Amino acid sequence: MIKLIIKVVFPVFFLISSSAFAGLITTDLAEDTYVTYGGYDWTWASPVNSENYNGALPGETNVLYGPSSFNRNWQFIEGNTLQALFSELTLDLFKKTDGSLITSIVYWNSFFTDTTESNFYFKSSVWVDDSAMSFFRQFDTFYVRNIADRPTAQVPEPSTLMIFAIALIALSLRKRAIQ
């Protein structure tokens, strides 16, 4: 009976698992996708600052999700505060040791997945009205969050780990009993 289940169930699982679809990442940002500076976490969120962007090429339609999307505690920062903090941030802060850029574009955009170094100098932290057809739509978008607003890590309770360990032990003992 067990061999029959293995012969039937595993192929079904393989067929089902092969039909996966990629989509927007809705979890909190990984630590290597933002920079901590001046009491804030800074993330390079998008190569455009328009909520709905239709590019020059067919199919180049992007949705830029706002900083409060998916309960991540990110926010816009505007005005003089934005300019003062951006004057202190350099491109070198947004580079990894291998020279690649630190961005979180895949977390906030439906189409765009990366940007270039030259775009760093055209930055914004606000959305442009979608009806405004101007070059301001091309500004890169940055979001910030206060360090105190970082989500805390979810750690499993010791009892959960114990139940998991007991289940693994029981499975191994059952396998030995069958043999």
Image (tube, rainbow, N blue to C red):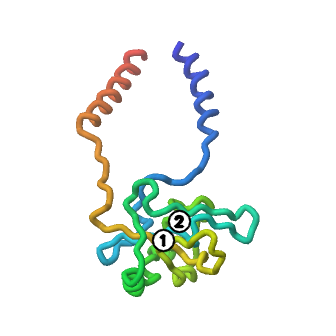
Q: Position of residue 88 (x, y in %)?
A: 38, 85
Q: How many numbered callouts? A: 2
Towards the viewer: 163 or 52: 52
From the image, tell me which residue sits under label 1.
44
| Furthest residue toward front | 131
Q: Is residue 7 left or right of residue 126?
A: right
SS class of the residue under badge 1? strand
Q: Residue at x 63, y 70 (%)?
A: 131
* Vertical order, 175 against 30 (above or below): above
| Res 32 quadrant in image | bottom left
Sequence-wise, the earlier of marks 1 and 2 is: 1
Tags 1 and 2 touching, CB below 8 Å? yes
Q: Is residue 60 left or right of residue 153?
A: right
From the image, tell me which residue sits under label 2.
105
* Vertical order, 8 against 81 (above or below): above
Q: Residue at x 31, y 78 (%)?
A: 38
* Vertical order, 118 against 23 (above or below): below
Report the Cα–Cα distance between label 1 and label 2. Answer: 7 Å
Callout 1 amino acid = Trp
Q: Position of residue 105 (x, y in %)?
A: 53, 65
| Furthest residue toward left | 158
Q: Position of residue 62 (x, y in %)?
A: 63, 63
Q: Position of residue 166 (x, y in %)?
A: 29, 28
Q: Quadrant of the N terminus?
A: top right
Task: Tell me if mark 2 has few (under 14), some (14-19) or many (20+) residues whose alpha carbon lies within 10 angstroms of its own.
Answer: many
